[in-house]
Amino acid sequence: MSTMTESPKTDSAGRADVVALQRSWWERNGRTTSIWSARIALIAGLIAVWQLAAGRIFDPSFTSRPSDIWTRLVEWNADGTLWMHSWITLQEVVYGYALGSAGGALLGFVLTSLPTVYRVLDPFIMALYAIPKVALAPLFIVWFGIEMDMKILLAAVTVFFLVFLNTAAGVREVDRGLIDAVRLMGGGPRDIALKVVLPASMTGMLTGLKVAIPYALIGAVIGELVASNRGLGYLISNSAAQFDTAGVFATLVVLSVIAAILNFLVGLLDHRVSRWKPAEART
């Protein structure tokens, strides 16, 4: 008799858990759908207002029209201009981003693990960080010429300091109690570095990687604007020289797409590395 009386309670509890899981799933996915719907509606609304206002409220020769920008993208796609220049800039951005990120993360981790060395070098690092990266472009041209190497290194330098400073901040914020606990359990410096400091500092490093994405684009495009006959920066300069605002905006659209793709890839890395965090902390 006791089994027969407890069975309905067990079934109802199981159904309640299933309903709760379904409700949680629908809440998460419904919220994501609503956010994306709002984003798409906002973009569509801005494009519609821009298209209608051009020629009525402001001069389209200064702001162009979304339809003209689309036409220019189609033309550049047809004759290969878009892909050739985009590929050049994409290589500069990816190589510069990878080089600057690797150097910044490694040096930030190593130097911050050596407090005395970091305190000695800190003012010099901050002084170099404060130098406008645009001012480095002429010097890099003298050193490395006007080929792709100069743009890659300019993007790398721009990215390096952002990743370095965020990684260093993440290492400095590691809970000292965890380090002491590992030492009490017999862990050596290697265990502390790999099992405590490195995982705990990943949040700061990933923040630096996210923040550095647009700056990698900025570094590469600045190098192309200063001295280049290829790349999206050259397209911007050439279009502006011809007073072709549609061409300038079309290039900016391509740069925005590249930045969005890179940001998405870093977001996937962040999600994979941060699987141990609660779901609320990863959203």
Image (tube, rainbow, N blue to C red):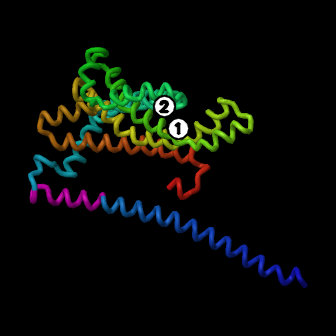
- State the residue at coordinates (30%, 19%): 147
Tell me the quarter of the image containing the N terminus. bottom right
**Is 125 within the magenta?**
no
Q: Quadrant of residue 41?
A: bottom left
Q: Position of residue 143 (x, y in %)?
A: 30, 14
The tag earlier along the polypeptide, 2 or 1, is: 2
Mark number, residue 155: none
- State the residue at coordinates (31%, 41%): 254
Q: Quadrant of residue 25?
A: bottom right
Q: Position of residue 170 (x, y in %)?
A: 50, 40
Say if residue 37 shows up in the picture.
yes
**Looking at the image, residue 161 lies above or below residue 149:** below
Circle 1 packing at 10 Å, graded few (<14), some (14-19), many (20+), is many
- Magenta residues? 43-57
Seen from this angle, which residue lies furthest right? 1
The residue beneath circle 2 is: 108
The residue beneath circle 1 is: 171
Compare residues 208 and 83 and report the one nearer the observer. Answer: 208
Are discs 2 and 1 less than 8 Å apart at CB?
Answer: yes
- State the residue at coordinates (11%, 38%): 243
Compare residues 106 and 9 and report the one nearer the observer. Answer: 106
Compare residues 122 and 266 and report the one nearer the observer. Answer: 122
Q: Secondary structure at mark 1?
A: helix
Q: Secondary structure at mark 2?
A: helix
Image position of 182 (left or right of 201):
right
Task: Identify residue type, mark 2.
Answer: Gly
Image position of 188 (left or right of 280):
right
Task: Identify residue type, mark 1.
Answer: Val
Marks 2/1: CA–CA distance: 8 Å
Circle 2 packing at 10 Å, graded few (<14), some (14-19), many (20+), is many
